[in-house]
Image (cartoon, coloured by chain):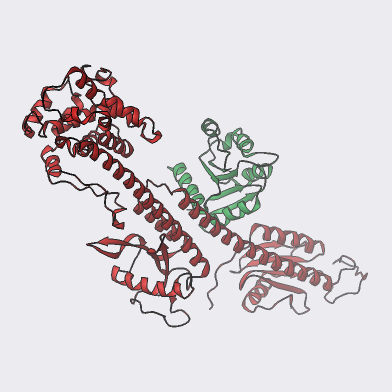
Amino acid sequence: MTDRKVLVVDDEIHIVQVVAIKLRNNGFEVVTAENGAEALELVRSQHPDLVITDYQMPVMTGVELIENLRSDAEFVELPVIMLTARGFAIEDDKKARLNVAACLSKPFSPREVLQCVQDVLQQVSA
Amino acid sequence: MTQTITTSLSETQLENLRNLARTVNRLDADFFVFDAQEECLINAPAGQIVSDPQHIAHCASQMLQNWRPGVQYFGDTNEILAFSLRDGQQAAAVVVVHAARQHPQPLSEGACISGENVVVPGVPMAHIADLLNLFISDFHNSAKATGQLEKVCTELSETYEELMLLYNLSSNMKVTQTDATYLQMACDQLTQLVRVEGIAIFLDKKTDGEKRLTLTAGSGLVTIDPVMAEILQVHLTRELKGGAEALLDSNVDRPFKYEWPDRINNILAVPLNGAENMIGLMVATNILDKPDFDSTDVKLFNTVAHQCAVFMENGRLFGDLKELFVGALKALTNSIDAKDQYTRGHSERVAFISRWIAERLSETVPLDEEQIHRIYLAGLLHDVGKIGVNEAVLRKKGKLTEDELARIKAHPQIGASILSEIKQMREIVPGVLCHHERVDGKGYPKGLAGDDIPLIGRIIALADAFDAMTSKRVYREALSIKRAIAEIRKGIGTQFDPEIAAVFIESDIRKLWSIIQDGFIESWDYSNFNEYGTVAVGTLIR
């Protein structure tokens, strides 16, 4: 099976790096972005299999990023995992409307992120 | 041939090489990049092909086999420059530059050669070499930085996992959880975080009157048996007395300090400390991806062990308090019961029977541990109101006057008002108040009917009646169980709730009876607490 590609977006560089390292060490190809605009560009050019995005980001929030993605027919089904800072739990209906596959709250266990990515991709291919 | 691990260039690095290619092309030189397998990654001639591919490939091959730093020169007139790019110790790529259209010798600045092969004026070979050397140092600095960043992030990632472990441990400290569950969770989470072969927790438990270390929780492969554990505890105590934070032993740089079974390569043990003494220990053996345990591991294990110890101490104190409380209640109610020789021990029996019924009822009706315990306490306290009734009336042999009857019938109300003063007893009040109600509404004090009577009241009513029937009274002998059950059957729908009565009759009443007859001594079976040797206060007085 070819390496699965994951896009990680977060304005906090250490979060991006930690998640990227964990995934890379486990056979994933990872591309990273520090903001929504960069992320959109990378989605279009790199065609990742899954996107992990932060919720709170300046300029374009995670929600706005997903909305932008979903408005494009090509990315309506693209699985998205959201990272939320404690206290900013997304409401269930928003989660459903945006088709967010999973939500993880910070601080997170990198191992949990890996498991989540594997589970979501497993579900998608099923 | 040496085995080389394939390292490939990243996208960024390839991008940089392509940019370099363009710059080199503008200087009218051909640019080639080969990977460690001598496959050509970039083929960028400056114009019409003049380079001999075989020759170029040969240079690349040479570079890969004999690594030397900096730019190397090849060719009859040193017109080929090449250098290696490394990732740590491994070759990642080789760059070959063929300044084919250049004048073979380094020219002085400003010189220009006319003719077919026009050269960019004023660009000597040295310039190209400088350019390439600059690229090499940039490349390696950047690769080093990336490597360092990776290492930092891996450490950070581990630290996050540690944080999550400690967070989980502390957020799971619910007193109502059993020791075993908590300890097992601690072991499981620790083994995931610190890659060891096995982790085990041993606790001091009283078995057959003796205090011994028993395996209470563990993960992975645990090669320490209880006998070994005792020895381990002795060594650990010695280490701790000597000022160490833990027992740490291995034969990595020096021989073992203590003797261990063959399978052990390294071992770490930390104490679980109770209020006054060591109540157990946690031990880990054979760390997997490191040669030995280090001080970070010691601190982590100590933290986890401490959390576990605190959790258990809390649980024990909580259990002690509960026992103290119930013990005090029993003392109180026994003294009330003792006012009349025929009711001695009645409250404890009713409490026991009520709980018996509640436990069986919980198979069909939702009743949790807390509620069942409340029913027990209500059973214990149901006649506490009798404290307000004159002893003479309670003991009277003959028929009671209207007035005397009224006084006795007041006891549920009196009990309820005593208890409702106490905040923690309020949930028990309905059981005390309603234990003489009847489902047909002909009970007292309020004459409630059917489901208007709180469940707790209906349960105690049955337990109370059963015990009364099966006890000797001043006016009659005790009924046999068979008779008592028959009487209960008769009372279904009138005195007794049908569902509760059914549950009771269908249960093993003989067993219940034999437990009571044996003068049951209840030891509080919080499965985790009886190892501390505490036994309930209060025994059945007959």
Q: Is residue A76 visible?
A: yes
- Residue B2, position as x, y percentages in the image: 54, 77
Q: Is residue A29 left or right of residue B339?
A: right
Please name the color used to draw chain B.
red
- Residue B10, position as x, y percentages in the image: 63, 60
Residue B446's quadrant in the figure? top left
Residue B69's quadrant in the figure? bottom right
- Residue B305, position as x, y percentages in the image: 43, 60
Give the camera-side residue of B106 and B410. B410
Q: Is residue B520 above or below residue B489?
A: below
Q: Is residue B321 left or right of residue B297?
A: left
Residue lying furthest bottom: B255
Q: Is residue B140 above or below residue B318?
A: below
Q: Is residue A65 above or below residue B277?
A: above
Image point (45%, 72%), residue name: B240
Image point (43%, 76%), residue name: B250
Image point (33%, 69%), residue name: B229
Q: Is residue B131 above or below residue B411?
A: below
Please name the color used to draw chain A.
green
Q: How many marks?
A: 0
Give the camera-side residue of B216 and B372. B372
- Residue A33, position as x, y percentages in the image: 65, 48
Q: Is residue B74 visible?
A: no
